[in-house]
Amino acid sequence: MIKKLTFVLVAILTTQWAFTQEKETEDIPLSYVMVTPIYPGCEDETNNYFRKSCFSKKINEHFFEYFDVRKATKKTKLKPGKYKIYISFVVNTEGKITKIKTSAPHKNIEKEARRVMSFLPKITPGKINGLPSDVPFSLPVLFEITR
């Protein structure tokens, strides 16, 4: 009886140790590849670095085409000068912009920034291992009040 109990105990401990060792040395497979989201007009970029650069450029262009500085700063007491808006968002698995967050010198500016970001065009979603994946982004945007 003691031999059986000892054998079972050794078997359990050996199995436990074997699984623990396997988890500690697990490698990330080479097939783990992330493809960044692709903004319309950036499809011809050859790698993630250039896609990200193009993505940021297109977001900036969209932002300044639609961001209404006068409307956003009308009821603020901000003096003329340069200001920064921090924007974060997620490109979801469907290529839609979600979870838009902004930080700016005034809540009206934040509201206008969220409005502009909410109608970005549909984007080709990012991929991990060939499957669409949510991809977070954050970027600062500089603007100027010239009153």
Image (tube, rainbow, N blue to C red):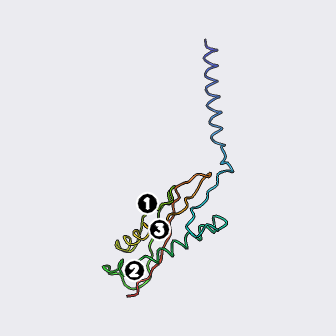
**Disc ID at residue 69:** 2
Give whichever of 85, 56 is nearer the camera. 56
Measured from the top left, where is residue 51 in percent x and y? 61, 67
The residue type indicated by label 2 comes to Val
Kindly report the distance in space between the C-alpha atoms of the residues bearing marks 2 and 3: 18 Å
Element type at mark 1: strand
Separation of residues labelled 1 and 3 (CA atoms):
13 Å
Q: Residue at the location (43% across, 60% down)?
A: 99
Q: Are marks 2 and 3 in contact (CB under 8 Å)?
A: no
Q: Residues within 10 Å of mark 2 (few under 14, many from 20)?
A: some
Name the residue that disc number 3 marks: 120
Q: Nearer the viewer, mark 1 or mark 3?
A: 3
Q: Residue 118 at what x, y percent from top left?
A: 42, 66
Instruction: Count residues near mark 3 (Cα–Cα under 10 Å), then give few for <14, some for 14-19, many for 20+.
Output: some
SS at circle 3: loop
The image position of residue 41, as x and y in percent, is: 58, 70
* Residue at 38% from the left image edge and 71% from the top image edge: 110
Q: Quadrant of the C terminus?
A: bottom left
The CA distance from mark 2 to mark 1 is: 23 Å
Q: Residue at x 30, y 79 (%)?
A: 75
Decide if residue 65 is on the left or right side of residue 35: left
In the picture as drawn, the residue positioned furthest to the bottom comes out as: 147
- Pointer 1: residues within 10 angstroms few (<14), some, or many (20+)? few
Circle 2 or circle 3, nearest the eye:
3
Position of 91 with respect to 80 (left or right) is right
Task: Give the amino acid type for the residue marked by disc 3 in the picture.
Answer: Leu
Q: Which residue is mark 1?
A: 99
- Residue appearing at x 64%, y 24% in the figure: 11
Task: Identify the residue at the far top of this view.
Answer: 1
Of the residues shown, which amino acid type is indicated by label 1?
Answer: Lys
